[in-house]
Amino acid sequence: MKTVVVLLAAFAIASITGCFIDTAPAASKGPMVGDSTAGAFELAASSVYHIESTWTNQGGAEVDWPSLQGRHRLVAFFFTHCGFACPRIVHDLKGILNEVPADDRREVGVVLVSIDPEHDTPEALQAFGMMHGLDELQWTLLRSADSNVRELAAALGVRYKRLAGGDFAHSNAIVLLDERGEIAARRDGPETGIQSILDALALTE
């Protein structure tokens, strides 16, 4: 009798599991994302969210790169002791956000990726964010292993190199990712302006 009860319980669990699987989308060949606003969709082959890497944010928490999907993201590369170009990038990112209607602004996240993980500890990232008044609910500052930084930079078409003395030469690019992690627009330098990014966000006429 005990054996029959165990078998019936196992069958019941298997049936419940089977019902759960049957409710999933029929064609799920790749990573899916879903939330209350974006729904669920399959990532395209060109999505940068296929990159599997783990990062640390300014609060010291681990962040899996694919977890950032589901929201428009403005992505730029920087290092915290940068004296001119990086503060200018932050200024330009704020300028883009200021062009977004207030009701839509919370739908756009900003990611700053450190190219100097050796020195940019979570504490350094947090200090940089506080110095520039960056809201942690909207601005995510990340550090990771150098190999992960280089992989992401290559995927987004961003170049950088370490100079003598510890500074870096790097692209001043701002890349807009859509919810699926595809590049929707980019600004490769201050001279190119932000209009293409605003157009991609459908914020201008």
Image: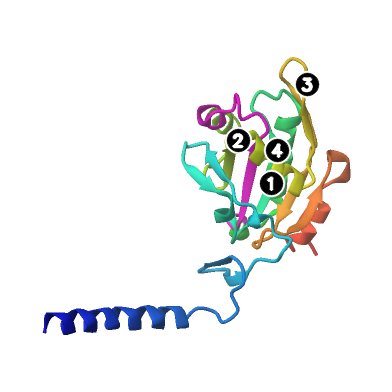
Question: How many numbered marks, from 0 up?
Answer: 4
**Discs 2/3, front:** 2
Mark 3, secondary structure of its residue: loop
Q: Position of residue 130 (x, y in %)?
A: 54, 31
Residue assigned mark 3: 163
Residue 77: mark in rendering: 4
Residue assigned mark 2: 145
Mark 4, secondary structure of its residue: strand
**Discs 4/2, front:** 2
State the extent of the magenta-drawn residues as a range: 105-126
**Discs 3/1, front:** 3
* First in sequence: mark 3 vs mark 1: 1
* First in sequence: mark 3 vs mark 4: 4
Mark 4 and mark 2 residues within 8 Å of each other at the beta carbon: no
Q: Quadrant of the N terminus?
A: bottom left
**Discs 1/2, front:** 2
How far is disc 1 from disc 2 in space, using C-alphas? 18 Å
